[in-house]
């Protein structure tokens, strides 16, 4: 369909070596589902991968499908995509078709895992499978806690169809009035205040539990007295969540936090983009529901497994024998490069320090903040914040610093999608403690991970700069792989100081010596370095490009990478998720290799490496090579100048390039495929090796 349509269009792009962003992302989520199929993973971890796959898909529909739906509504203004030549309307059609087989595959995998978990004593039950004591326990819980807060209703001329909240589960029923022999539709929202499951008493060493939705389905005659249930199904409506604060009118006197609160309320009521159902859904009911929600049948997906698998993560605390069904426990380890008893500021003044999460603990950076908050010589602490955990020692130390009279500046991004409410609350606490809050720019998200600590000593001004590839989030630092560099490099510190001054003056276009800062210089610096490698290759000199990213979508950079390949530059890309560049296309991307790794930890670090040996330029930073990161966000990348730190980063990259267990290589069709292995080749699991190395420190 797409090739035929593209052949009729005169497009300004070469589509021979590119693929659609959305379909590439769906390939990545399919890769997550592969981990759920992998029998070498423990059973409970496999169940979590199914839940992650589904959560990913939910967000994809809310954000990406929501955005495409808005664009498709423009009609004639719906322009073709620069990587596939498809309009938004055409992309939506392909997305809907691409996703459909995923549901059957997910259902099959989920059912198989649950069956095997039941043999290990982790059993999801329905009422007929419970013993008498369990039924009594469940009935008592329903009577005391669930039934009193339910809000059932029928739909008729005097009871209009209600608003269905985004991603909230509802029971939809066909009911027959016993007295009047009349058929009506019934609706029962599952209140978010109810727990998703109930752990049942058991005399065995098992975890027996029942989903709240299944308990309620067994009590429908009590919930809808006077009616006979003819059909029942659980439904979930996914709504467009691609709402921008820029669409919300506000006065100059408004607090930006209030603007974001209004945006969050608006998100829950945006247009539907998908309907999922589990159970029996008569065709007339489905048709009426689609008409009510303004959805086509392409946007409807039937499911056999529960529609909300968020409960899976909460099962962890109830497993009867976690070691049998879960990963061997691993906690971030102390870094061998950090002396435990020596002050952090003193250590960093002597040499750069690198932390690699989650193999190494975030504690040294937290120590740095804590010591700085109490150090009488520290006069200011400045930091950019995009996402924080719900409990944050980072905020505690920043507040302590402000209360100790230090100048604390926090550049808080309130537009961090789905973390807005959390950031609003943290911003208020920081402001109350005396911190100076900045909220970035109207049309740019501040996505950089930068912290600057300034001291005044008898020797003059000293600056310590921390640059990271991931968020200042203690929780995700134990789940995501990221790099965190702490340095006393004078030039980097001066650039960081200039950065915060520019941010306070609403100036994104500063001129920096060491740092790359988007949207002004990040992309241009990468292009310059790619051109450098192209010229070296053409001159017969050694050349190389090696980058580790989450996503690659920027058309200009994709074309430049293709130019590098055509010049003979060896290009290795480790791209976890979206990759719109297709490697191995003759005459276009012959010298480009792309691989991704999906495993126990979420690969999140960004590394940009150009050149060979002493000629090498190595940076780490916060940006993926996406147009939004290059043009619509404030991003920062920092040079790695310490040879020991550079060697540590290369060790990680070398392991990932050698991985033949969790890695997949992108073939010339843009599809992730297993790494080819010869008989007798040793297994290389990069994440497992890094855990073992960290544990031996």
Image: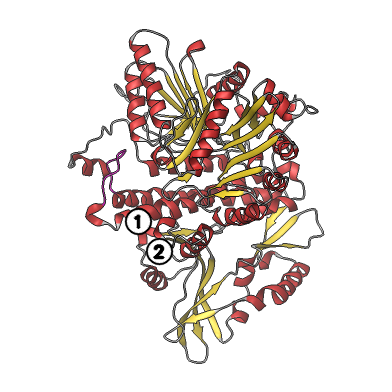
Of label 2 and label 1, which has the lower sequence position?
A: 1
Q: Position of residue 404 (x, y in %)?
A: 73, 45
Q: Which residue is drawn at the image coordinates 19% and 39% (left, top)? A: 7
Q: Is residue 660 visible?
A: no
Residue position marked by numbered label 1 in the rendering: 69
Residue position marked by numbered label 2 in the rendering: 271
458 relative position to 441: left or right = right
Position above or below: 668 against 257? above
Position above or below: 94 against 16? below
Name the residue at the bottom extreme.
179
> Which quarter shows the C terminus?
top right
549 relative position to 216: left or right = left
**How many residues crowd around disc 1 within 10 Å: few (fewer than 14), some, or many (20 or more)?**
many
Q: Is residue 152 visible?
A: yes
Q: CA distance from mark 2 to mark 1?
A: 9 Å
Q: Position of residue 527 (x, y in %)?
A: 37, 26
């Amino acid at each position: 369909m797409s090739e035929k349509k593209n052949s009729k269009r005169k497009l300004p792009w070469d589509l021979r070596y590119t693929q659609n962003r959305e379909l590439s992302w769906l390939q990545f989520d399919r890769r997550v589902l592969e981990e759920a199929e992998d029998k070498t993973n423990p059973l409970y971890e496999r169940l979590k991968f199914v839940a992650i796959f589904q959560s990913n898909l939910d967000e994809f529909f809310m954000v990406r499908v929501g955005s495409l739906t808005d664009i498709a509504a423009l009609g004639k203004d719906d322009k073709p995509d620069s990587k596939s030549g498809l309009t938004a309307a055409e992309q939506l059609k392909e997305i809907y078709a691409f996703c459909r087989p995923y549901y059957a595959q997910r259902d099959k995998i989920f059912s198989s895992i649950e069956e095997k978990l039941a043999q290990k004593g982790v059993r999801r039950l329905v009422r007929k499978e419970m013993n008498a004591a369990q039924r009594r326990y469940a009935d008592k819980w329903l009577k005391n806690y669930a039934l009193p807060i339910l809000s059932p209703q029928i739909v008729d001329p005097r009871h209009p169809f209600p608003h269905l909240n985004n991603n909230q589960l509802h029971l939809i029923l066909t009911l027959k009035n016993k007295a009047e022999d009349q058929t009506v539709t019934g609706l029962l929202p599952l209140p978010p205040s109810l727990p998703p499951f109930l752990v049942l008493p058991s005399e065995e060493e098992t975890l027996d539990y029942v989903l709240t939705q299944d308990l309620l389905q067994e009590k429908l005659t009590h919930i809808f007295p006077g009616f006979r249930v003819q059909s029942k199904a659980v439904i979930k409506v996914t709504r467009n969540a691609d709402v921008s604060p820029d669409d919300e009118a506000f006065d100059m006197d408004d607090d930006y936090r209030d603007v974001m609160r209004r945006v969050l309320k608006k998100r829950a009521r945006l247009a539907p983009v998908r309907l999922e159902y589990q159970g029996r859904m008569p065709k007339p009911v489905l048709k009426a529901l689609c008409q009510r929600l303004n959805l086509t049948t392409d946007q409807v997906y039937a499911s056999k497994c529960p529609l909300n698998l968020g409960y899976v993560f909460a099962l962890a605390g109830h497993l009867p024998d976690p070691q049998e069904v879960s990963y061997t426990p691993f906690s971030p380890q102390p870094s061998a490069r950090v002396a435990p008893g020596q002050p952090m500021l003193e250590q960093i003044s002597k040499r750069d320090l690198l932390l690699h999460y989650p193999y190494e603990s975030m504690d040294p950076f937290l120590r740095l903040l804590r010591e700085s908050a109490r150090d009488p010589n520290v006069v200011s602490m400045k930091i950019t914040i995009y996402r924080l955990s719900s409990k944050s020692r980072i905020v505690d130390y920043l507040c302590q610093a402000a209360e100790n009279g230090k100048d604390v500046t926090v550049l808080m991004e309130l537009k961090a999608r789905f973390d807005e409410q959390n950031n609003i609350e943290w911003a208020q606490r920081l402001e109350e403690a005396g911190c100076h809050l900045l909220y970035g720019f109207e049309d740019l998200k501040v996505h950089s991970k930068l912290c600057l600590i300034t001291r005044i000593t008898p020797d003059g001004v000293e600056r310590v700069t921390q640059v990271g590839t991931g968020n200042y989030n203690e929780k995700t630092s134990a789940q995501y792989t990221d790099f965190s560099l702490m340095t006393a490099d004078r030039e980097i510190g001066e650039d960081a100081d200039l950065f915060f001054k520019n941010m306070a003056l609403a100036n994104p276009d500063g001129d920096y010596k060491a740092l790359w800062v988007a949207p002004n210089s990040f992309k241009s610096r990468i292009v310059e370095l790619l051109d450098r490698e192209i010229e070296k290759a053409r001159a017969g000199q050694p050349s190389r490009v090696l980058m580790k990213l989450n996503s690659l979508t920027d058309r200009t950079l994709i074309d430049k990478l293709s130019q590098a390949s055509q010049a003979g530059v060896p290009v290795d890309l480790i791209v976890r998720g979206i990759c719109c560049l297709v490697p191995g296309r003759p005459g276009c991307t012959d010298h480009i290799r792309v691989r991704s790794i999906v495993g126990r930890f979420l690969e999140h670090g960004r590394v940009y490496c150009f050149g060979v040996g002493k000629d090498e330029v190595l940076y780490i930073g916060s940006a993926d090579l996406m147009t939004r990161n290059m043009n619509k966000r404030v991003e920062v990348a920092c040079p790695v100048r310490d040879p020991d730190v550079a060697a540590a980063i290369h060790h990680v990259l070398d392991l990932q390039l050698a991985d033949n267990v969790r890695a997949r290589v992108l073939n010339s069709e843009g599809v992730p495929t297993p790494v080819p292995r010869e008989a007798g080749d040793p297994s290389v699991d990069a994440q497992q090796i890094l855990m073992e190395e960290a544990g031996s420190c």
